[in-house]
């Protein structure tokens, strides 16, 4: 697969794709083209067997993503705003949340507005110590439009989400860690190394089981969450990874998942 995009750099090594959002002149703000590139990348990566885990990060040392591109939507009317939000939610944010392979956000600086929403749509987040995370949309007379009003309360609780969105204040990396918005904080120079270390651990496990785990965990706040877990659990007994995993345990060797 030839991953060549205007605003994304994709590097694949040892089944890990490092996807760098690359508009450093605009602090990697999400414009239409960048959202389109992301949508296409995830479509292509879905069936690419050379990719088992995806790491999303931002170009440069200052920013993960400083939000949606404000200059691009400054003249929009209500209909255009609604269309932009609906299309991007479907083609990028929900696609990432429901992606069958793990997506890790390596937040290397500002993650604001659409940038924090992108990190929250990812399966989990680690951050560099200089990261600043927030949803400042109300300072522009808007609310988050890429899923932020829904995903932030799930991750940090309703009261904290209310305060964060109303005040538009940014969380430091330390505060984001304390409230569970990011899983780990590392020095910026070690961020990608640490993300790759976590990704490598994941690649050693059954990708089939992980696919079902993502779907089950994503159902945790839905009415049928336990049913999704039971059905997925049962289904996995019929997969070859289960045979290999249990055989390896009994034979006292490491599993070799395909
Ligand atoms: N959009 C467009 N350009 C941006 C953005 C952005 N979100 N953020 C930064 N830039 C540009 C700046 O305009 C500047 O460009 P130029 O040099 O041409 O003037 C360049 O990036 C560097 O930025 P600064 O000079 O401002 O850098 P500072 O270090 O002084 O400040 C900040 C860094 C604090 C991150 C500051 O840039 C900032 O506040 N950015 C905007 C943050 C923000 O409000 N983000 C939320 C945007 S709204 C949003 O994400 C809504 C999501 C849902 C949309 C739904 C569809 C309608």
Image: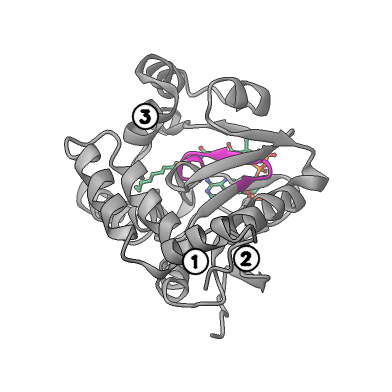
Q: Is residue 132 above or below residue 232?
A: above
Q: What SS does tag 1 mark?
A: helix
Q: Earlier in the sequence, mark 1 or mark 2?
A: 2
Q: What SS does tag 2 mark?
A: strand
Image region (quadrant) for ligand 1: top right
Q: Residue under circle 2?
A: 16
Residue farthest bottom in this picture: 1
Q: Neighbour class for label 2 at 10 Å: few (<14), some, many (≥20)?
A: many
Snapshot quadrant of residue 177: top right
Q: Is residue 224 above or below residue 213?
A: above
Q: Which mark's residue is nearer the viewer, 1 or 2?
A: 1
Q: Residue under circle 1?
A: 244
Give me the residue at 59% from left, 61% from top.
Answer: 251
Q: Is residue 44 above or below residue 101?
A: below
Residue 31: give its label: none
3D distance between C-alphas at marks 2 and 3: 28 Å
Q: Earlier in the sequence, mark 3 or mark 1?
A: 3
Q: Which mark's residue is nearer the viewer, 3 or 1?
A: 1
Q: Earlier in the sequence, mark 2 or mark 3?
A: 2
Q: Which mark's residue is nearer the viewer, 2 or 3?
A: 2
Q: Is residue 143 visible?
A: no
Q: Which residues are magenta?
A: 106-116
Residue 154: give its label: 3
In-image side of 126 versus 219 (left or right): right
């Amino acid at each position: 697969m030839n991953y060549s995009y205007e605003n994304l750099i994709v590097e694949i090594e040892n089944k890990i794709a490092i996807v760098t959002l690359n508009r450093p002149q605009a602090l990697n703000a999400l414009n239409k083209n960048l959202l389109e590139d992301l949508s296409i990348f995830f479509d292509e990566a879905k069936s690419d067997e050379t990719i088992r885990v995806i790491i999303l990060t931002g170009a440069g040392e200052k920013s993960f993503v400083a939000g949606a591109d404000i200059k691009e939507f400054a003249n929009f009317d209500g209909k255009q705003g609604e269309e932009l939000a609906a299309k991007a939610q479907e083609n990028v944010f929900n696609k990432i949340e429901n992606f069958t392979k793990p997506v890790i956000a390596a937040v290397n600086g500002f993650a604001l507005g659409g940038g924090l929403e992108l990190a929250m749509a990812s399966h989990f987040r680690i951050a560099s110590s200089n990261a600043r995370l927030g949803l400042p949309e109300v300072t522009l007379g808007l609310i988050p439009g890429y899923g932020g009003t829904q995903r932030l309360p799930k991750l940090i609780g309703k009261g904290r989400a209310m305060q964060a969105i109303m005040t538009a204040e940014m969380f430091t990396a330390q505060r984001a860690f304390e409230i569970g918005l990011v899983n780990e904080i590392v020095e910026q120079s070690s961020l990608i190394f640490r993300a790759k270390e976590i990704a490598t651990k994941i690649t050693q496990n059954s990708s089939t089981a992980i696919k079902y785990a993502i779907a089950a965990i994503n159902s945790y706040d839905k009415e049928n969450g336990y049913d999704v877990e039971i059905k997925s659990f049962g289904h996995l007994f019929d997969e070859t990874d289960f045979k290999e995993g249990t055989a390896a345990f009994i034979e006292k060797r490491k599993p070799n998942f395909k």
